[in-house]
Image: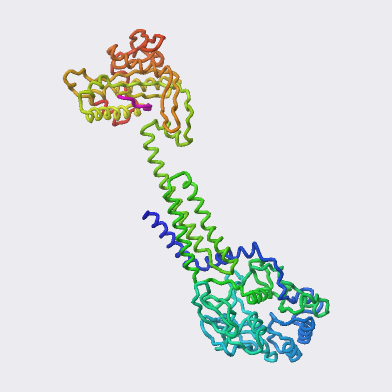
Amino acid sequence: MSFLIGLLALSFALTLLFSFVFSDLKYEYEEKGGSLLWSLFPEQAQEERITVVAIDEKSLSEVGAWPWSRSTMADLSNKLADYGVSLQLYDVVFPEAKLGDALFLEALTNNNGVLAQVPIFNGQSALRGGQLNGALDNTRCQYPAPKATSYLANTPTLAAQQVGHITPVVDRDGMVRKQPPLVCVDGQVYPSLALQGLLSSLSKVSPSVSVHQDEGLFSSKWKVSIDSYFGLSVPIDKQGNMRLSYRQSPDSFQVVSAADVLNGSAPSSLLENTWVLVGATAFGLGDVVPTPHSGTTPGVELQARLLSSLLDGRTPYTPDYATYLLVLFGVLVSAILITLARTQNKISAYALPLAGLILPISALVLHAYLLRYDIWLGWFNGALFSFLAGTLFVLADHQVVRHQHLRVFSHLSSYLPKSVAQGLLTRSPSGAIEASRHDLVLMCADLRNFSAFEESRPPEEAAALLHCFFVNATQIIEAFDGQIEEYKGDSLLASWPSTHSNSATNDALNAADALQKMIIRILPQQPPKGLEPLALGISIERGPTLVGSIGPMHRRHHTLLGDTVTIVLRMQEMTQDLAQPVLVGECAARDLQGDALESQGSFLLDGLTTPHVLFAPKSHHIDPIVGIDSKVLRMVRSH
């Protein structure tokens, strides 16, 4: 458990480190991923309160190149008033004095027009063009409203009282996601174009606007409130910015060409009793920015989105409880991963990697769900923590499983031949017979008189002797390329794969000679009183053998079946009757050259119907020991 908690702590530390070291990268992916719901499933409902009057390619073609004369702009304002437009907002700055400014100013004053200006946050800029207007007399310049040191404003000859700034916050990737509703310049507070439009619709008297902290758990940390209207406020972040909402599709904003307004052909249904935003949409004018919906969105559309959010009271914001919710999400992720990691069954083997994929996505899903209610929770830290924790848990589980796998294989190969153990790892358990035919040289080695010895001695002593015999016998047989198939009672059964040459039979016969020399060293020198001395009987035969496993699926047994097995077992029983320590069957004898063997005659083995000729080596020193490792060689030569 402590190990799992350590992995969670490491994941948390790595998440914090990544967020700190790669804060810009984290912010970019947080914003791009967080706005996926808006870009993939935008709202298609038509925005009927706001109409964009576009200075588009058609307008430039019919009216002339931009900028237009002040008389043309005054004519546009008056034509919009004739259509019944209730509020005109111009996403355009007029920094130079020109002929006709008085006429345009009169039209703006009569038609409830709002001009734009641009405070500049770049501290290196010294630009101060035009004259700032529209300051909120009853609002103090206070934190967190950002401060600008330079600006581009309208010419003093267009000193309109209703002015709003259009300064966006441009991120490193060029995308506009936020805009401050209030900006401080030289101790004066200036509202944004959208906020000024809202204020203009509420009262002709300059309203009181304040910035204050909100203590509510479900509210943003800071708010811009219109004091004269209870509940009318704009949530802002600690940098003083309000977030743009891209929930509406670009097609939901109705657009009318400025040329159609000037020539009187614009649909009156799109303009009557609406708020109008006048701005450039022609690509050649350069007022385009990338957004989640498009890489070339007109800047006037951003103002339409801000104004729509203010009218609906649906400005996306990060609530004060966001940190607690993210912590709760991390605790839930930790609990799920710990539960899956401690569950030892088939489900956990698949569930843990699956959780490592699903949990990071769930952080994004939770963010998208809350975004439907204009709550910007954030998802990156939750997803990164889930991904890191899930990955570490999967890797740790893999290492544990691998360690257990190696341990199980080690145990399995100590009970079964290694080749059989390796085969079991590659297939599922089965209740059917799984066996195949092989041509093998078999050896049966049995301790004679061991049952009587075991009866007369403590079981610990008998077990120690038998263990010593099996350990040394296994070393010798494996040194001669043999394989232990099974230990049964006080005997063992070994095999050598038969080849076209006689090497397998020679190896088995040399192993038998080494076993006989080894047994002299480990057996008691004096047998217990009244008991015959212990000895080793060995039989060797070659032939077809069925090798495999039988038994129910939950309790399998590795076994060798066939006539060759029966023959070699019965031959071993004959070693005592014939007073020969080693007997070789007639099939194995054919593999040996020269006169190394001596016939013992033909015998009808117990339980069989066909007589078999048995052979015995002429001497215990049969062949030079070749290929045996140094440890076994020293053991054999010592006797």
Does 355 lie within the magenta span? Answer: no
Residue 316, relative to residue 79: is it above or below?
above
Q: Residue at x 42, y 33 (%)?
A: 421
Residue 271: x percent and y percent?
76, 77
As drawn, the residue found furthest toward the left would be 529
Residue 220 or residue 451, whichever sits in front: 220
Q: Is residue 545 left or right of residue 597?
A: right
Residue 573, relative to residue 235: is it above or below?
above
As drawn, the residue found furthest toward the top would be 601
Q: Is residue 433 left or right of residue 175?
A: left
Q: Is residue 126 visible?
A: no
The quadrant holding residue 462 is top left
The quadrant holding residue 593 is top left
Q: Which residues are magenta?
A: 481-489
As drawn, the residue found furthest toward the front would be 230
Residue 580: x percent and y percent?
29, 14
Residue 443, relative to residue 88: is it above or below?
above
Q: Is residue 75 visible?
A: yes
Residue 517: x percent and y percent?
26, 22
Residue 17: x percent and y percent?
45, 64
The quadrant holding residue 43 is bottom right
